[in-house]
Image (spheres, grey):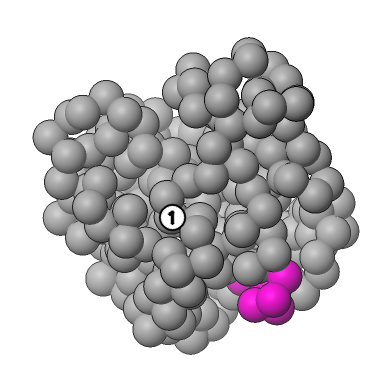
């Protein structure tokens, strides 16, 4: 499969992407994960991106497009699920041109629609293992860490990410509404858009797989 997952921060794109990779071996590509890894490693890209990410702002296109092009050129025949990219119309246009050049056009763009109150609850209660080699995700309500905020997998401290405080989340949602939400209209005009309103991950995956199968049929 070759799809893009759209949705506000906390809509569940990463979780859905991981489930979809098990369907046919396609690979999840998350610019958020790649950028956070660059921040931890202290690369020039990571140093420039860190300030934007901590505020919940979008990382500028100039810091992203070169990285994405290199990623696709590395394995051009690989199925992929894009999680968190593209985020702007210029990025979408650049992505389309890049994939056209590789003869690997998008098959579908899925818009995950989740109520804002659900998003706020999900993100403010999420915690992440501070060990970059582990990076396990927890939820203080539904999947809490061990006693003392310790990671159950590696024992490291579990923390709240700086971009998941209520203030940063509010900013991220506002940025999404202003800059990323127009992508819904862009991809709707191309005929690639499928809107999904289910909140259960299994139901979302079933809907996406069914839509892809109907497209092939």
Q: Is residue 20 above or below residue 54?
A: above
User: In the displayed image of the protein, which residue is found farthest to the top?
Assistant: 154
* In the image: residue 134, left or right of residue 174: right
How far from the left and from the top, in percent, is residue 12? 66, 56
Image quadrant where residue 73 sits: top left
User: In the displayed image of the protein, which residue is found farthest to the front?
Assistant: 148
How far from the left and from the top, in percent, is residue 209? 78, 54
Seen from the viewer's position, the closer of residues 59 and 202 is: 59
Figure quadrant of the C terminus: bottom right
Seen from the viewer's position, the closer of residues 205 and 12 is: 12
Residue beneath the point at 52% across and 66% down:
166
Residue 28 shows in this picture = no
Residue beneath the point at 15% across and 55% down:
62
Residue beneath the point at 31% across and 29% down:
40
> Is residue 116 magenta-colored?
yes
Image quadrant where residue 143 sits: top right
The residue labelled by disc 1 is 163
The tally of labels here is: 1
User: How many other residues sit within 10 Å of disc 1, few (<14), some (14-19) or many (≥20)?
Assistant: many
Question: Start and end of the magenta stretch?
Answer: 110-118
* In the image: residue 100, left or right of residue 189: left
How far from the left and from the top, in percent, is residue 170? 48, 74
> Is residue 19 magenta-colored?
no
How far from the left and from the top, in percent, is residue 114? 69, 73
* SS class, disc 1: helix
Residue beneath the point at 69% across and 76% down:
117
Q: Is residue 92 above or below residue 98?
A: below
Seen from the viewer's position, the closer of residues 164 and 111 is: 164
Residue 88 shows in this picture = yes
């Amino acid at each position: 499969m070759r799809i893009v997952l759209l949705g506000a921060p906390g809509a569940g794109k990463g979780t859905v992407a991981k489930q979809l990779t098990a369907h046919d071996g396609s690979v999840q590509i998350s610019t958020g994960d790649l950028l956070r890894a660059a921040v931890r490693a202290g690369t020039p890209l990571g140093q420039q991106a860190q300030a934007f990410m901590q505020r919940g702002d979008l990382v500028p296109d100039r810091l992203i497009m070169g990285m994405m092009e290199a990623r696709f050129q590395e394995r051009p025949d690989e199925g992929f699920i894009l999680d968190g990219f593209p985020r702007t119309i210029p990025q979408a246009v650049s992505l389309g041109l890049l994939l056209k050049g590789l003869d690997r056009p998008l098959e579908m763009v899925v818009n995950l629609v989740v109520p804002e109150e659900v998003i706020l609850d999900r993100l403010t209660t999420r915690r992440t293992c501070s060990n970059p080699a582990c990076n396990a995700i927890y939820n203080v309500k539904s999947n809490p860490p061990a006693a003392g905020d310790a990671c159950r997998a590696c024992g490291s401290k579990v923390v709240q990410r700086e971009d998941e405080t209520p203030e940063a989340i509010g900013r991220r949602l506002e940025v999404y509404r202003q800059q990323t939400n127009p992508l819904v209209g862009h991809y709707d005009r191309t005929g690639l858009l499928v809107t999904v309103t289910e909140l259960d991950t299994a139901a979302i995956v079933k809907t996406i797989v069914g839509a892809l199968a109907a497209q092939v049929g």
